[in-house]
Image (tube, grey):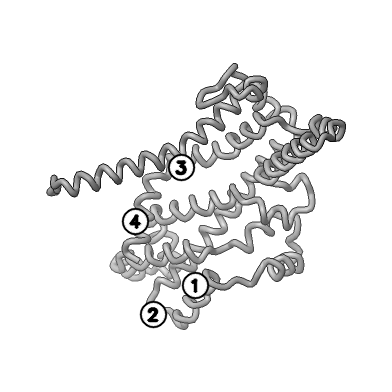
């Protein structure tokens, strides 16, 4: 590898590194502040003494979330189920569709590719989708928030590009040994395509974990709510209480306040909601980088 030590190259490297550092700080500092608030005493938060480090360290917010708010542990479990079921279905259907569409001799392939790409520009709309989910009897079930988002056109294209550059010799050797298409996919292609599979699995998992709008549309039972929807309600309730207090309606504000979670609990809930994704990411980071490079640059 030959390094360009010219002045222009050094300036460009400095600009790139400075930009990356600024982006890193802009991303990391708010998260550090949120964590500091969640571990701080409520009095210190009210007095505005919390910066990037906790003030008067306290675990009261986490105790309130995990042991006093009966809905959050259940909502956390609901989010885990939705994410696990949805991601497994997404990966299964996306890889199967991409494997077929990657075959250049597939019958009616241009038509299927057009149907796969079309949702990137035009969708049926929210109301038709709601009526379809309702008519299929999927309301208030995990299928309502997983089946409509079964295949993403973006991740499908990434996997098509990934499979298109898979060595054809391996598949031909498998066919000579008697493997059909499904056996080739499950026993030969997928085990050697974990980088691409892990990449789209991470994207799908993050999407399901952070989603709350679909649950708000299709879930009628409070026990079915995912964590993000409970978090949204906590934030809205606290905002309403602040508005009532600002309007001088102290009695009603106090009434709401007795049922609300303080600011520290909001931030503690945020930390609880993002920790699972942060914990999973290091284990698939090596696959993630490789999968993105193979799936995008060779497309």
Q: Is residue 201 above or below residue 182?
A: above
Residue at screen point 14% across, 48% down: 4
Categorize mark 4 by other alpha carbons within 10 Å: few (<14), some (14-19), many (20+): some
Q: Residue furthest top?
A: 56
Q: Quadrant of residue 252?
A: top right
- Real-space CA distance between mark 2 and mark 3, rounded to the nearest whole angstrom: 37 Å
Residue to which mark 4 is pinned:
293
- Real-space CA distance between mark 2 and mark 1, rounded to the nearest whole angstrom: 19 Å
Categorize mark 1 by other alpha carbons within 10 Å: few (<14), some (14-19), many (20+): some
Q: Quick one: label 4 or label 2, which is nearer the N terminus?
A: 2
Residue to which mark 3 is pinned:
281
Residue to which mark 1 is pinned:
117
Residue at screen point 39% across, 80% down: 105
Residue at screen point 22% across, 45% down: 11
Quadrant containing the C terminus in the rendered view: bottom left
What is the number of the mark on residue 105?
2
Residue 8 % position (x, y):
18, 49
């Amino acid at each position: 590898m030959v390094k360009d030590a010219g002045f222009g190259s050094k300036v460009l490297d400095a600009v790139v590194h400075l930009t990356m550092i600024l982006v890193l700080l802009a991303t990391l500092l708010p998260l550090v502040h949120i964590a500091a608030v969640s571990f701080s005493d409520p009095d210190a938060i009210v007095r505005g003494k919390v910066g990037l480090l906790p003030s008067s360290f306290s675990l009261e917010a986490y105790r309130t979330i995990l042991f006093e708010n009966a809905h959050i542990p259940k909502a956390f479990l609901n989010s885990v189920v939705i994410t696990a079921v949805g991601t497994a279905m997404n990966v299964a259907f996306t890889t199967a569709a991409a494997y077929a569409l990657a075959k250049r001799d597939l019958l009616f392939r241009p038509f299927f590719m057009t149907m796969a790409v079309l949702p990137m520009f035009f969708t049926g709309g929210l109301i038709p989708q709601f009526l379809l989910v309702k008519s299929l009897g999927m309301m208030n079930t995990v299928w309502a928030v997983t089946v409509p988002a079964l295949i993403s056109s973006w991740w499908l294209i990434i996997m098509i590009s990934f499979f298109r550059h898979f060595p054809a010799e391996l598949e031909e050797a498998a066919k000579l040994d008697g493997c059909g298409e499904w056996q080739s996919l499950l026993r030969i292609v997928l085990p050697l395509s974990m980088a691409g599979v892990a990449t789209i699995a991470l994207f799908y998992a993050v999407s399901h974990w952070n989603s709350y709008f679909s649950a708000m549309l299709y879930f009628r039972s409070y026990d079915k709510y995912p964590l993000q929807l409970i978090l949204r309600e906590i934030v809205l309730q606290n905002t309403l209480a602040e508005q009532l207090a600002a309007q001088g309606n102290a009695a009603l504000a106090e009434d709401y306040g007795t049922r609300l979670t303080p600011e520290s609990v909001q931030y503690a809930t945020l930390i609880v909601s993002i920790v699972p994704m942060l914990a999973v990411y290091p284990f698939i980071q090596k696959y993630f980088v490789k999968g993105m490079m193979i799936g995008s640059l060779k497309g």
